[in-house]
Amino acid sequence: MAGAAFAPASVPHDPRRPAHAGHGDHDALVAARTAFFDGSGRTGQASSPGRRGSTPAPDELARLLNAEYGRGPRALSLGNDPGATRQDAAVAELRRAARLCTPLTPEALLAHRDGSPRLIAALTEVWPDTVRRHGSRHAEGVLRTVLTDSVDGPAAGCLLDLAVGSGLHPLTPAETAALAEKSAHRAVRHSAWRYLHQTPEGSAHLPDPGRAADAYERLLLAPPVPVLGPDEDGPSGQVVAQTMLLGRLDSPGQGMSGGLAVLLGDLGDRLAETDGIAGVVTIVVAAHDDLAVDSRLVHQRGPGHWVLRLPVDAPTPPAQQDMHHHRPALTWWSTRLLGGMARPVDVLHVRYADDGSLALAEAAERLGAALIFTATPDPHRDLAARHATSDPADPTAAEELRHDLHRVFVADRLVARAGAVVGIPGRGGTEELVRHFPCLVRLNAGAGPSAPPEGIAPYRPAPNEDERTHRALDMLYRDGARPDSLDPEDRGLPLLLSVGRLHPVKQQDLLVRAWLATGGYRTTTLVLVGGSPGAGTAAEEEVRHRIDMLLAESPQASGRLALLPALPNTEVRRLQRALAQRTADVCSWYVCPSAKEEFGLAVLEAMDAGLPVAGPRRGGVAHYLRDQVNGILIDTSDQAGLMRGLRRVAATSVDDRRRYAAAGRKLVAERFSVTRMADELADEYIALRSR
């Protein structure tokens, strides 16, 4: 495995590690992980508050951390703990086995085949080492025994997926076809079909595509061989694949599509023009509604840049927490489609700590491609604080805690699988990243991973730019009675602009609440841009509902708030420029109220447009936005912090606004261009393949 160097037993304590990342760290997650990865075995146990002098019982988070990161006799046995479940104990056991590269026997591992999705994810990560240690023949025999022992339901699909992943053939084609035919589970049927595709003479046992229930099944039964990527006699250099599995590439600001859609589109275009890069493939997903509109799995976005659509068996693109349902299929589709290219993929770059990224990481291994992972301290940052008082009796809180711990595990597995790890810098560079990933301290003489800057493409004015700019402002101020525009009479008021997908983590509703509470609606207007134009996701509808409820309580403010659906990136940047070019007396600010932003592409675009910016103290924005130098940093952790931030914005002088705007534009021009990002990433890709 590429990441064997990241196994905890081989990572001694390094005195160059930041002092706050040691065993005494007040963050229970950091303390547990630091002790585990440096091999001390001390878990930095957290406790629930108790009476002075008493010995408090471990809280829910501490129990799970001790089970997962404890080693030897110090590990807390959840099997005897009434506050946890057998599933928790099994998940902790398999995660420790994966991190310590300790393979279990096939019999012991497959005993968990009926487990939760998080347990299956850990099982899948341990399985390859189990097969290597105990041999393919033995593993295949155990799989056959279990599969033929009246196994039905989702477990049968899981077993077949494990067989496909390790190249085993526990069932004959006829047996597999019979299993698919009798199973009442669609997912099992699909697993069987993928298995038949990979089994000698198995394709002859597949049903006729005409019997498929829908477009997804037709593609699965008769996968196309799309023309994809550069020809064999094309330009020399590396063939790079990059992934964006959440949302849609062509609709930033809608659903789960955010700034990454803009970033990867522009980055792929620029990388394709960069020395040493022969071509770029941007990998996205295509759900049922996407396939109904366009069944093609590949199109060329520009010279040397292709977009590959991996089919997913879901009505719409799956949310991050649902990616586990699609991991085996995503691995299979990406291996098959990328493997059919005229030239092999050299480097595959994944972002996000989720099961979709793990699927592509596994595909990279099967294809012989080098894997690079962009790691961020999410959800690690503040996880312990968020869940310190989780009530195990609250099913929602319990699920959120376990989902966050699952993502921490997934991130570790991506680090372990990756040939190279890069980070997104925070206020202290990559120091925070190393704090949450102790195994990364060994990189770059203790400084941690490199952090190539992210960047934006230059804005290209249209031939009739002035006309379009005037039209954009006229549309914004056409009718205060409309929810998506402002009153023309308020055109002279200062304006606050915020752009981003509608989601609770972006906190547009909290910004509205703070704007109302400070009385900002009396002297300013507020414009929010983001969200699907029609019926949106559950998250979008939740944020819209919260805003509607706030305005219902303050009807006098409704005419001074405009909620526009997501706009094409060019139109967003045109609107930003139009607002920035207004007179000093009619000032406009860009405000980012997000609870967290790993980087904040929209913030950079606002700076580039010449708007003064107020952004969150937490996360990556503070890496480049310096308080009272090129903008204002605000506390977005709660309403009170946002209110203080809005008051600071209102009190900023004209001279300071101009100074912040000028400094912001200069910063973006000098440091955050997509060209520089492409150049530095290309160096990373080329160096990775030359190792």
Image (cartoon, helix red, strand yellow):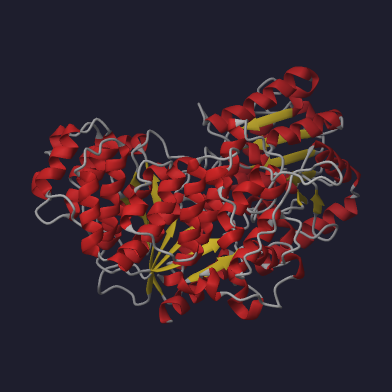
Q: In the depicted view, which residue is nearer to us: 366 or 519? A: 366
For the point 47% across and 46% down, the residue is 246
Report the quarter where the C terminus lies: bottom left
| Residue 71 visible in the snapshot | no
When asked about the image quadrant of residue 8, the answer is: bottom right
Q: In the depicted view, which residue is nearer to us: 339 or 526? A: 339
| Residue 83 visible in the snapshot | yes
Instruction: Give x and y (percent) for residue 491.
Output: 77, 33
Q: Is residue 271 above or below residue 552?
A: below
Q: Is residue 539 above or below residue 237?
A: above
For the point 26% across and 39% down, the residue is 188
For the point 14% across and 41% down, the residue is 177
Q: Does 222 sit left or right of 64 as displayed?
A: left
Total of numbered circles in the picture?
0
Instruction: Give x and y (percent) for residue 151.
Output: 25, 39
Instruction: Give x and y (percent) for residue 687.
Output: 47, 79
Report the quarter where the N terminus lies: bottom left
Instruction: Give x and y (percent) for residue 76.
Output: 59, 52
Q: In the depicted view, which residue is nearer to us: 59 or 530? A: 59
Q: Is residue 308 above or below residue 235?
A: above
